[in-house]
Image (spheres, rainbow, N blue to C red):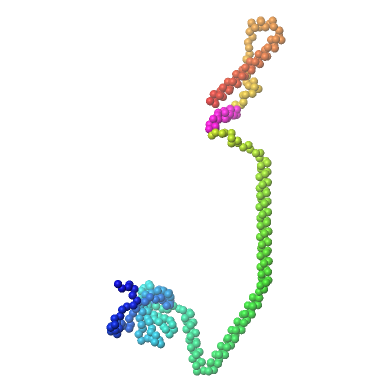
């Protein structure tokens, strides 16, 4: 089996390359090539601008009966990108450039015109110097004079730059070091001032805290060990607090009745009727005994009545709280 990539082919011993028929192609045959636009142009049909470097699939052919020093001249056919109008241009080996034929106009190029003008002036000068030796001498004198003026101007510019650029590097370095030291000193002073301000603020804050602690007495902290079990709170009796609240509301509306002085004003003495039998029995007793026992009996009766009223008031409050 033969190899897939073969570099050397087999030629039989009776092979004669002259017997191979040659393909006859026309001289003006066209080839399809890929090229870029050699210059900026504008289509004459639609006015579309085609810039230099735009790629085209062009047809290339050899121009008949035209050559430059034996070099063939080629013609290219492209189409406008907008209206598809045909545009043709060909090579110009004499000027190493391209020339536009038809279908578009070449845009203005100042650099190309300047080069053409310089070439034209140089050509005219050479033609004048060819038959006139005095013209050659004049041109050389003008050139030498112009060159001397250019050198003098250049020397003046160099001297001016040296006068203006007379820099003392030692003084520059010294000044830079002084500025750097001054800047470092300013930074240190600013840092010290900031530290002093921060210390003063901290001291003032500490003094304020101490003064506040002196003015406000320390509050007693609750003892966390008072309730050892979580269920102890359920065993507390909330009744005294509610009873106290009810007592306060009653006292605000009515007033306190627990003191003896206030109760004494509410108690009224009961007048006793005189019994004739007792009067007869008491006649025999002395007036001092009878008069001494009456105030004591009246005081005892007042005390018992006040105690009775206080007990009734407490019973009414207990029943209301229940």
State which region is magenta. 231-252
Nearest to the observer: residue 162 or residue 13:
13
Q: Residue at x 59, y 36 (%)?
A: 224
Q: Position of residue 228 (x, y in %)?
A: 56, 34
Q: Position of residue 123 (x, y in %)?
A: 48, 88
Q: Residue at x 41, y 87 (%)?
A: 69
Q: Is residue 234 magenta?
A: yes
Q: Residue at x 56, y 24 (%)?
A: 317
Nearest to the observer: residue 230 or residue 292:
230
Nearest to the observer: residue 123 or residue 206:
206
4 displayed left or right of 276? left
Look at the image and tell me whether residue 53 can be seen. Answer: yes
Question: Residue 190 is drawn in which quadrant?
Answer: bottom right
Q: Residue at x 38, y 72 (%)?
A: 82
Q: Position of residue 155 (x, y in %)?
A: 62, 82
Q: Main secondary structure of the magenta part?
A: helix
């Amino acid at each position: 089996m033969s190899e897939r990539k073969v570099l050397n082919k087999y030629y039989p011993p009776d092979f004669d390359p002259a017997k191979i028929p040659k393909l006859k192609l026309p001289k003006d045959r066209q080839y399809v090539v890929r090229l870029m636009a050699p210059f900026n142009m504008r289509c004459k049909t639609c006015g579309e601008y085609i810039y230099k470097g735009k790629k085209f699939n062009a047809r290339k052919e050899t121009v008949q009966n035209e050559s430059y020093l034996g070099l063939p001249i080629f013609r290219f056919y492209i189409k406008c990108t907008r209206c598809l109008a045909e545009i043709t241009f060909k090579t110009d080996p004499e000027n190493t450039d391209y020339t536009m034929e038809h279908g578009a106009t070449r845009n203005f190029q100042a650099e190309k015109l300047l080069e053409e003008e310089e070439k034209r002036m140089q050509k005219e000068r050479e033609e004048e110097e060819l038959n006139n030796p005095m013209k050659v001498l004049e041109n050389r004198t003008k050139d030498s004079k112009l060159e001397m003026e250019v050198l003098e101007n250049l020397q003046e510019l160099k001297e001016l730059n040296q006068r203006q650029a007379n820099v003392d590097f030692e003084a520059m370095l010294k000044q830079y070091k002084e500025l750097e030291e001054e800047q470092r000193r300013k930074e240190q002073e600013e840092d010290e001032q900031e530290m002093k301000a921060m210390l003063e603020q901290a001291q003032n804050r500490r003094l304020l805290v101490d003064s506040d602690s002196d003015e406000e007495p320390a509050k007693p902290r609750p003892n966390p060990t008072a309730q050892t079990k979580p269920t102890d709170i359920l065993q507390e009796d909330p009744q005294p607090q509610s009873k106290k609240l009810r007592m306060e509301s009653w006292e605000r509306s009515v007033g306190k009745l627990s003191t003896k002085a206030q109760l004494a004003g509410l108690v009224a003495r009961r007048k006793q009727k005189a019994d004739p039998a007792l009067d007869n029995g008491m006649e025999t007793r002395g007036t001092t005994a009878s008069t001494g026992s009456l105030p004591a009996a009246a005081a005892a009766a007042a005390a018992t009545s006040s105690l009775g009223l206080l007990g009734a008031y407490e019973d009414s409050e207990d029943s209301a709280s229940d």
